[in-house]
Image: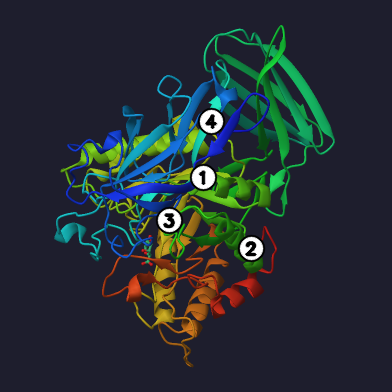
Amino acid sequence: MLYPQRNGFRQYFELNDFWEFHTDPKDVGRVQNWAQGLSESQPIAVPASWNDQFEDTRDFLGPAWYQVGFDLPTEWAGKTILVRFGSVNYLAEVWLNGERLGQHEGGHLPFEFDISEAIRKENNRLVVRVDGTLRPDQVPPGNVPPNPQDNFNRPYPPANFDFFPYCGIQRPVLLYSLPLQYISGLLVLTDIEGETGTVDAQISVSREGQAREARFTLVGHGARITQSVQLKEDKASIQFQVPQAALWEPGSPNLYTLTVELTDRTGVTDRHVSKIGIRTIAVQGERLLLNGRPIFLKGFGRHEDFPVHGRGFDPAVLIKDYSLLEWVGANSFRTTHYPYSEQMMDLADRLGYLVIDETPAVGLFFAEEGLEHRLSVCRQYVTELIDRDRNHPCVIAWSLANEPHSNRPAAGPFLRELYDLAKLLDPTRPVTLVSHLGVNDVTFEFLDLLCLNRYNGWYTEMGQLQEGLRILETDIDAVHTRHPKPILLTEFGADTIAGMHAQPPEMFSEEYQAEFISAYLDLLSRKEFVVGAHVWNLCDFRTGQSFHRMGGINMKGVFTRDRRPKLAAHVLRKRWNNNKRKK
Ligand code: ADA
């Protein structure tokens, strides 16, 4: 799904504003026909989660209703017009001027509706019903009946995952216009042969129309190449050879500008511009190769999380977090535990960060009840995520899930189906998922890259770091012996209260976190088959309430929630010394 653009043929404006908002705790909005307009409401900021904006909505997960009004720009008359939501968590149902446009399940991925027929010149009213209620058959699941085999530390609200289930319209809502016949899809594949880069670009067009030709132009780093081809029905594709290509990688994130134009006898009828990076990623035996050379991933699991905004999009926080990654010397992150904003991905391309792109499948369990629906939602997520992010050079792997409870019989076929789907949609990237089970994880038979979360010395061997490391080493050696594939330690860390100190180090002190992380990195650096280390977490973040989350905060960040460094951040900066490729 292409992001809207502004040029001579395409226009958009953002509906980032104060919308009208009304909670619907008794779920009467449908029968009272709130879709025709809210009779009572209060202002709410969009985009943002609703939970922290009011005094009485912190633990309210919905349903709730949003409404906003707008006029149609006169110059948009006669064009294709769409409304696009960057992320609404969790269930969204949308009406325009009382006409139901449709619905979408799942946060963190965009969806849109063609409103060319439903829109009016003036006084348009867009109404959205959002329901973030946790349900066992949803992904991620919640409100799961207690089951000893799938026991979770059940926080409040009762999520099957360890972060707050923020709800609302959490990323920008865009109204945008397109020509009647427009470029509706773009697939860019790159390769490298010697010093020459190869760029394959394929477009799909919305429908047959007056345009007969597509013109592709690639500009950058001394290159300017143009090719025109006839449209074949609704498709067109070309291949560029780029001599002395400026490759994309951390430390030198070289980007080219790819412009695609539809043309007819009168000239250009549509134009789409994108930034592309020439790079390759491959698993070769136990190595992970970026542009044909081994890469070591240094970085973090993160969250889109900030006070008051909740999981809401905030450009200043994006920039701040990239500044922290640069300061500490990281070169990568995983989008834990859901796809991040398109703006975050564009910045990863521009700034040169390697991204393991993860679906929202966290806390996945495989009891029979609700299994089919969970599978259909996971299939949808894999499809939507790859469609949204496949052209980003920063994305080096797809992660199907985080810590699925894959010790159940149904787990293997379920996850294998998602793996096969991801490989079908994108054969160019490694596919993984993140396991907490280790050597007996059935998925390790087929995954391309093995990702492990480990907390020896924290949840087990508490306060006994050396004993924890001994067990960790035994574990990863056993995984490697059985599955000679690259291993990435995707999570390891210790809750730390900023300002708490202890010598000798003890749990929750800054010294313990710093020693814990350093000792893990020392061990991992001795293992050739370990291709990366992602500390859990970059920053402290909001969770539900529980006896093991003081103040509803997970404190494993090396920075606090308001982005102040703990001792471990200084230790990592010294260690990672901004050398973008090495351990
Ligand atoms: C798990 C999970 C993380 C977080 C972490 C922790 O590995 O993947 O989301 O909950 O544990 O802090 O306990």
Cβ atoms under marks 1 and 2 closer than 8 Å:
no
**In x, y percent, where is residue 327?**
65, 67
* Quarter of the image where the C terminus is located: bottom right
| Residue that numbered label 2 is attached to | 323
| Residue that numbered label 1 is attached to | 397
Residue type, label 2? Ser
- On screen, residue 111 versus residue 566, left or right, reads left
The mark lying in front, picked from 4 and 3, is: 4
Residue type, label 3? Arg
| Residue that numbered label 4 is attached to | 176
Residue 354 vs 226, above or below: the answer is below
The 10 Å Cα crowd at callout 4, few under 14, some 14 to 19, many 20 or more, is: many
| Residue that numbered label 3 is attached to | 311
Cβ atoms under marks 2 and 3 closer than 8 Å:
no
The alpha-carbon separation of the residues under discs 4 and 2 comes to 31 Å
- On screen, residue 213 versus residue 372, left or right, reads right
The answer to whether residue 284 is visible is no
- On screen, residue 11 versus residue 87, left or right, reads right
State yes or no: Cβ of the residue under disc 2 lies below 8 Å from any atom of ligand 1: no
Q: SS of the residue at dot 1?
A: strand
Could you tell which of marks 1 and 4 lies nearer the N-terminus? 4
51 or 417, nearer to the observer: 51
